[in-house]
Amino acid sequence: MKWNFENYGQYKNDIFNKMGFDFGKSKKLLDVGCGDGSDAEIFINEFGLDVHGVDVYEDKNIRNIINLKFKKGGIYDIPFENNSFDYVFLHDVLHHIDERHQNYNNHIKGLKELRRVCKEDGYIIILEANRYNPLFYPHMVLMGGHNHFTQRYFKRIINDIFGDRVDFKFFEAHSYPRKLLKLFKIFESIAENISFFKPWRSYNLAIIKNK
């Protein structure tokens, strides 16, 4: 199924369509590291979800997102009870929780906390940028200072906690200059259709069935 989220911009439209996950209406979702609430707004307005957001700081835009229930809190100690959510969602959050050292044990601790607040038979959906993607690496890693995970490390930490309950997907999604959109879409199509390029695709996605 293809959705139209163009009102939220080309990048968000691409992200949500390429995730390809069918969120059940009226289900309860936690957006961990919700930032400015831009993903939460889509979950509320387009999927009809009961959305809660948590972040270590309160963005100035959060209170403008109608029906978003926000709490301050971090991934090591999420301020909700066990088995609270049908869906737990993270978008470019894991690499920030210990960005200086990228300690394996801290990442595992965070993943266990996600599992705790997710209902049995619920889903944990984790989207992380890929460190060595040729478009991300120059401006996000070298210039922007983001210590993104490699695809190999992303798969390792997810598998170490969730084992065979994970469906991995790897795709291209970027915010492109409008005038160059067609050109970049050609690159995107090549990257997603040539298996050789798979380890360098821009986004690593893990959809995890919690059991």
Image (cartoon, rainbow, N blue to C red):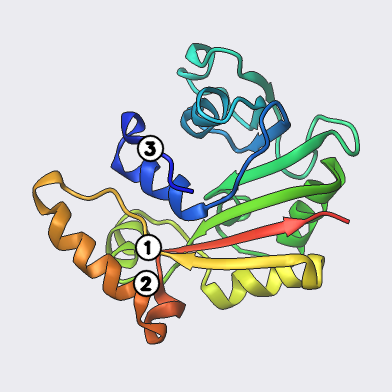
Q: Residue at x 57, y 24 (%)?
A: 44
Horizontally, is 138 left or right of 39 in the view? left
**What residue does disc 3 label?**
4
**What residue does disc 2 label?**
192
Distance from disc 3 to disc 1, alpha carbons, whole Å, reads 18 Å
Q: Are marks 2 and 1 in contact (CB under 8 Å)?
A: yes
Q: Position of residue 127 (x, y in %)?
A: 55, 54
The amino acid on which the numbered mark 1 sits, given as a three-letter code, is Glu
**Could you tell me which secondary element the residue under label 2 belongs to?**
helix
Quarter location, residue 99: bottom right
Q: Position of residue 68 (x, y in %)?
A: 61, 19
- Looking at the rendered image, the quarter that the C terminus falls into is bottom right
Query: Which badge, 3 or 1, is on the more N-terminal residue?
Result: 3
Query: Which badge, 2 or 1, is on the more N-terminal residue?
Result: 1
Badge 3 density bin: few <14, some 14–19, many ≥20, Cα 10 Å: few
Q: Residue at x 44, y 68 (%)?
A: 131
Query: Which badge, 2 or 3, is on the more N-terminal residue?
Result: 3
**What residue does disc 1 label?**
172
The amino acid on which the numbered mark 2 sits, given as a three-letter code, is Glu
Is 181 located above or below residue 183 in the figure? above
Quarter location, residue 119: top right
Q: Position of residue 126 (x, y in %)?
A: 62, 53
Nearest the viewer among 38 and 44 is 44
Residue depth check, mark 2 versus mark 1: number of the one nearer the observer:
2
The residue positioned farthest toward the bottom in the image shown: 196
Regarding residue 160, the answer to whether it shows in the image is no
Residue depth check, mark 2 versus mark 3: number of the one nearer the observer:
3
